[in-house]
Image (tube, rainbow, N blue to C red):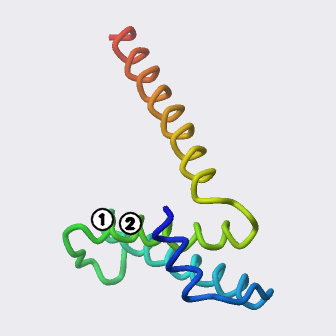
Amino acid sequence: MERIHSAQVKLHTSNTNEDKYLLLCKFFEEAGELVSEFLKKLGKATRKVSVEGALEEEVADVIITILPFAMHFGVSAEKFASILEAKLQKFERRIQDQEYLQQQSV
């Protein structure tokens, strides 16, 4: 996380509103690329050829671009990592609960 923040600082040294908008635009650009890859995986995209690992790379790009945006508003990399870990644990518990319920209904 700190490597992302360090790169962000080097790329955007000022703290203007324009920088914040540019970071948000970059996030939406990457999110669009993620959606495009997802549609390719579903066979619903105009260009249906998908490169192996492209979906995973686009997910990483989305995370990498939204983190600097959040940091612009005072969210530290450590806080983000802590929240992400808590969310992942919650997500894993939900999956386990669903698996348990599915096993019980069989």
Q: Position of residue 90 (x, y in %)?
A: 54, 32
Q: Nearer the viewer, residue 39 or 2?
A: 2
Name the residue rendered at 39%, 11% in the picture: 105
Q: Position of residue 85 (x, y in %)?
A: 51, 41
Name the residue rendered at 55%, 86% in the picture: 10
Q: Nearer the viewer, residue 102 or 4?
A: 4
Q: Which residue is labeled 1 in the image?
A: 41
Q: Is residue 46 left or right of residue 11?
A: left
Cα separation, mark 1 vs mark 2, equals 5 Å
Give the residue type at disc 2: Phe
Name above or below for residue 85 compared with residue 95.
below
The mark found on residue 38 in the picture is 2
Q: Position of residue 74 (x, y in %)?
A: 74, 64
Quadrant in which residue 48 is drawn: bottom left
Answer whether labels 1 and 2 touch (C-beta < 8 Å).
yes
Name above or below for residue 96 compared with residue 27.
above
Quadrant in which residue 23 is drawn: bottom right
Q: Position of residue 35 (x, y in %)?
A: 46, 70
Q: Secondary structure at mark 1?
A: helix
Q: Nearer the viewer, residue 43 or 74?
A: 74
Q: Secondary structure at mark 2?
A: helix
Name the residue rendered at 71%, 88% in the picture: 19
The mark found on residue 93 in the picture is none
- Dot 1: few (<14), some (14–19), or many (≥20) neighbours within 10 Å? some
- Dot 2: few (<14), some (14–19), or many (≥20) neighbours within 10 Å? some
Q: Nearer the viewer, residue 58 or 75?
A: 75
